[in-house]
Amino acid sequence: MFLRGNAACPGCPIPKELDALLEVTGKKTVLVVPASCTSVILGDTQGGQPATIPVIHSAFAAAPAIASGVASSLRMRGEEDATVVVWAGDGGTGDIGFASLSGAAERNENILYVCYDNEAYMNTGIQRSGLTPYGAWTTTTPSGKREFKKPLPLIIAEHRVPYVATASIAYLNDYQSKVRKAKGKKGFRYIHLLSPCPPGWRFDAGLTVEIAKLAVETGIWPLYEIENGEFRLTSASKVLVDKSKRKPVEAYLRYQGRFSKMTPEEVKALQDYVDKMWEELREMAKK
Amino acid sequence: MLIQKGKALALVGNHAVAYAVKQAKPQVLAVFPITPQTTMLEKLSEYIDNGELKAELIKVESEHSAMAAIFGAALTGSRVFTATASQGLLYMTEMIYWVGGQRVPLVAAVATRAIASPWSIWDDHQDFVSKRDAIWVQMMGENVQDAYDITLMSFRISEDPRVMMPVMMGFDGFILTHTMERVEVLPDSVVDEFLPPREFKLVDFDNPLGIGAVATPDNYARYRKKAMEAMERAKMAIKEVMAKFEEITGRKQYGLTECYMCEDADYLVVGMGAWVGDMRVAVSRLRERGKKVGLLKVKVFRPFPREEVREALKSRKGVVVFDRAYSFGSGGVLSLEVKANAYGLTTPVHTIVAGLGGKDVRPRDIEGTLEDLIEGKLEEERWLA
């Protein structure tokens, strides 16, 4: 609808995720895209334009600051009904762009920041990021990553911004309702989308939505929102506080080549990590 | 700080630039504090806080974000401004190239300062000249009045349809930023006429564009060539803007360069920035003693005034260039530019590397160097260190 053809890999959810976002935010959206897969997906179109909205391509670490400038300028133009969206990958968000992200969140800039998280530097060919999960193979962690994923949505929530949510392409209604809620708010809003990557995660390109669904069902990717500090599980994640309702993480890992070298001990370590995370989520849901 | 007396004020350089910025009416600013620029940021904050300037000041968390924020705001149609120095300029360098590559009209002031390490808060030009390949127009002020004037002219040059390029206004840290001088400021109404509201915007919902997308090698090379052509066109635009400014101020602005006592000079000293004032003193003293010396001031560093410099160098017996920045393994940066444009001429060009990290240079140092040049005792490169 908004994308007029693109250069995404087979099975890549990014075009659909972006389209679903723009369907809600509408034609008065400015997209700021730092270096990432989307730079390529929307790229190489000199003389053309892949999207029907203004797109500003950005240096890696600069997107939240550029968006701050766009938002200020729109305010001075009296066009506050427009939505300024940063559309960034996990590296641009959690690693190189973290300072400018934190700065924009602290200033409560009027920006909707969406991180589509494919859990590694996929644009440059699958190198580990701060958001790559424990145990995952990447080209720079050939025997599996030894550190756990940076808990970015919670770190952003600690900035006391009006809205933070997680989402998944497998739960489109949940995702779009969160975008709608975010659009209706002013100030800094953050949505973190888990974005399965067939070549990077080593799974069949036909399984993208299935993998995204398993991430939620096993509890490794909880769906929630934090609205003005109030935490709430959403959609399929609502019932998963009960451990018996969660599938074992192994059910998620086994379809993905990136986890194929994990030992049973490592799988257990990851399961323990997920279980502990859910204890924390339970406490947050009680408050 | 302001002592109002007609249209003349007593202002330190940072406040003179801030005053010019206020009169240029930018809608969005983003500045991160760094010595010796900080008091400019403070003055701009005051203007916005007390309503004298109706603008948003984005209190960014770094210089990288300062340049990024005004980039976004400029694309969205606002007149914008930022300022920095030294490490801050280095930290925003990625975005300086990004802005230059996109040919976004905007203005940045640089209170020039040495680059670490070791730490130095004092003045030299190493920061300013390190941006010479970033597709920016770069101009240097000689005194506080010049800094005020160049700031106003920068906005107009930047937004000139023939240029459409960012402009960097350099002025020497502390020597100008913190020195109070008499400054003639223009009435607001005159500035309004000189700088009509900006019309450039690329973020347009009716005509959406992709800005800065991936380019094929053919397109990339073509864009770079267009930038080269725009730089050449900028020379004409800068001269015209300066002529217009002369007209409304009655102040002589000259052009890309300025020649002082050049006509019959056998020997020339070449410089850029605040110490050109000391060079005037040195040249005047030597003239009093009958020495035929002159001064060539480089006012615009990019686009480099190749034709003017070459013309000024012709049939001189000797030229000495004063450099406050050095390209290690090669030579003084301004000297390299001058030498490149003396290619094929017989004029010998000497280099004095001085004033690094704020090391004091006085008119008598310049005088002595010129005397050595006249007596044939000056080596090709000399460091006053």
Image (cartoon, coloured by chain):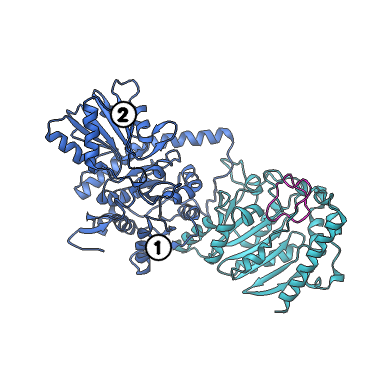
Chain colours: A cyan, B blue
Q: Residue at x 59, y 57 (%)?
A: A98
Q: Nearer the viewer, residue B273 or B325?
A: B325
Residue B124 on image: x %, y %: 36, 45
Which mark, residue A204?
none
How many tags in the picture? 2
Q: Residue at x 17, y 61 (%)?
A: B6
Q: Pointer 2 and pointer 1: residues touching (CB < 8 Å)?
A: no
On whether residue A130 falls in the magenta region, the answer is: yes
* Left or right of A276 in this view: B249: left
Secondary structure of residue under mark 2: strand
**Chain containing the residue with disc 1:** B
Q: Quadrant of residue A16?
A: bottom right
What residue did someone put label 1 on?
B55
Which three-letter amino acid code belongs to the residue tagged 1? Ala
Q: Magenta: predominant secondary structure element?
A: loop
Q: Which residues are magenta?
A: A127-145
- Residue furthest toward the bottom? A287
How far apart are labels 2 and 1 at the CA level?
Answer: 47 Å
Which mark, residue B350?
2
Q: Residue at x 35, y 28 (%)?
A: B339
* Classed neighbour count for the residue bearing mark 1: other residues with Cα under 10 Å, few (<14), some (14–19), many (≥20): many
Upstream in sequence: badge 2 or badge 1: 1
Please tell me whether residue B218 is drawn above or below residue B253 in the rendered image.
above
* Classed neighbour count for the residue bearing mark 2: other residues with Cα under 10 Å, few (<14), some (14–19), many (≥20): many
On whether residue A5 falls in the magenta region, the answer is: no
